[in-house]
Image (spheres, rainbow, N blue to C red):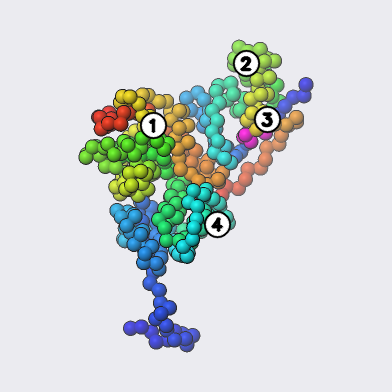
Amino acid sequence: MFPQAVEDGTRFDPSQARVSYSVTLDIGGIPVSLRTTDQDFRRLLEDRYAGFVNVSAEPKYQFDVEIAPPRAVALDEDVRVTREGGGWQVERGDFQAGWDTASSKGWIRQTVNPYSADTLLRIVHSIGLASEGGFLLHAASAIRNGRAFLFVGVSGAGKTTLSRLAPPDVTLLSDEISYVRKEERGHRAFGTPFAGELGRGGENTSAPVARLFFLHQGPENRIEPMDAPEAARKLLRNILFLTRDEDLTQRVFHSAVEFAEAVPAQRLVFAPTARAWELLR
Amino acid sequence: MSDKYILRSTAIAARVMGGEMIIMSAKDSTLFTLNGVAMLIWQAADGRTALSEIVKNKVCAEFDVDGDTAYRDAVEFTEALAQHGILQISEGPIPEPPAPPRAAP
């Protein structure tokens, strides 16, 4: 039954009632909840992150979404991430956000668009991972025979091409942004909804990382050795870390070096044909 | 010629891998790789030991190199690192700054 009046004596006004929808996105085993009163935005989230929505997950981070009126913004503007007091502030032309580190609760103010929350999610995860030995990486990733392979490369190196060529027994984790967490024994790669030119996210699953490849397109398919220092340097250049924070930067550095020491790294020269996958078993 | 004193910045992350040292500036994430000689100088950059002593006792003791040449190269190398803010150079000894409180993640 609806209450007729609240304690201060004012009448209940149904027109002022708002329903909040919480969409919890379980990426990398770290659930992030976005709470909105906007049905269109809720549907946008559920469509974009289908496969990663988990209604039963207990969120580790909770964000209240405030929808701003539509306006023209430049999406290529650099995002600014700063540590302020006991939390973080994030700002770009299309959104502002912040969260408190202790409570893991925050807010985002944005228009109805898929890019603002997507950027916030990447930042929240990259900061969260930095403190536990993991990272987000500009890399495609895939699982074959229960083992995860990472394919690192800048734009144009072939991440999406190799992903498109994957045979049916390969589970794609991402063609653009890979998710690595440190475990008691080794590292584990998780699927992400962060898609590149493939236009669709990866599968929401995970596997232990077996090998790290650096992509180079060439006339033939071959694998070349790479020593750990070179792998560490290349890895560091491809880690997604948008925060100019000395403490977290140092943590990411040591995580990347540890990863390069633990995971065999090779250079994968591949011709853009499905036969490249014959080398990847 | 006056001597120089050098001190490693604390705003860096560094690790020795495969006989070389990888250093990343924590301010702007720039990466540096030091070879064996450079690594000896870097590791001795405590702000108290004069660069001439470092060159004489570390570099010349380890490598077959003329002292004057090694010192000139060391000055050039340390000035290059100082330009990137990962090393401090002074005409006199440099006291180590107090360690900053570690921020919460």
| Viewer-side label of 1, 2 | 1
Same chain, marks 2 and 3? yes
The region drawn magenta spans B84-88
Q: Which residue sits at x=63%, y=25%?
A: B77
Report how far apart the C-alphas of labels 3 and 4 lie in the structure.
35 Å
Mark 3 highlights which residue?
B6
Q: Indicate the amino acid at tag 3.
A: Ile
| Viewer-side label of 2, 4 | 4
Mark 2 highlights which residue?
B61
Judged from this view, the residue extending furthest toward the front is A72
The subunit letter for the residue under badge 3 reads B
> In what quadrant of the picture does the N terminus of chain B appear?
top right
Which disc, if any, is residue A214?
1
The subunit letter for the residue under badge 2 reads B
Q: Which residue sits at x=60%, y=48%?
A: B101
Report how far apart the C-alphas of labels 2 and 4 lie in the structure.
50 Å
Percent across and percent down for residue B86 are 62, 34
| Residue B42 appears in the figure | yes
Mark 1 in CB contact with mark 3 (< 8 angstroms):
no
Q: Indicate the amino acid at tag 1.
A: Phe
| Residue A103 appears in the figure | no
Percent across and percent down for residue A278 are 25, 29
Q: Which residue sits at x=40%, y=56%?
A: A114
Mark 4 highlights which residue?
A86
Report how far apart the C-alphas of labels 1 and 3 lie in the structure.
37 Å
Q: Secondary structure at mark 1?
A: strand
| Viewer-side label of 2, 3 | 3
Q: Secondary structure at mark 4?
A: loop
- Residue nearest the observer in this picture, A9 or A110: A110
Q: In this rendering, would A231 be left or right of A166?
A: right
Residue A55: quarter of image:
bottom left
Percent across and percent down for residue A54 are 31, 58
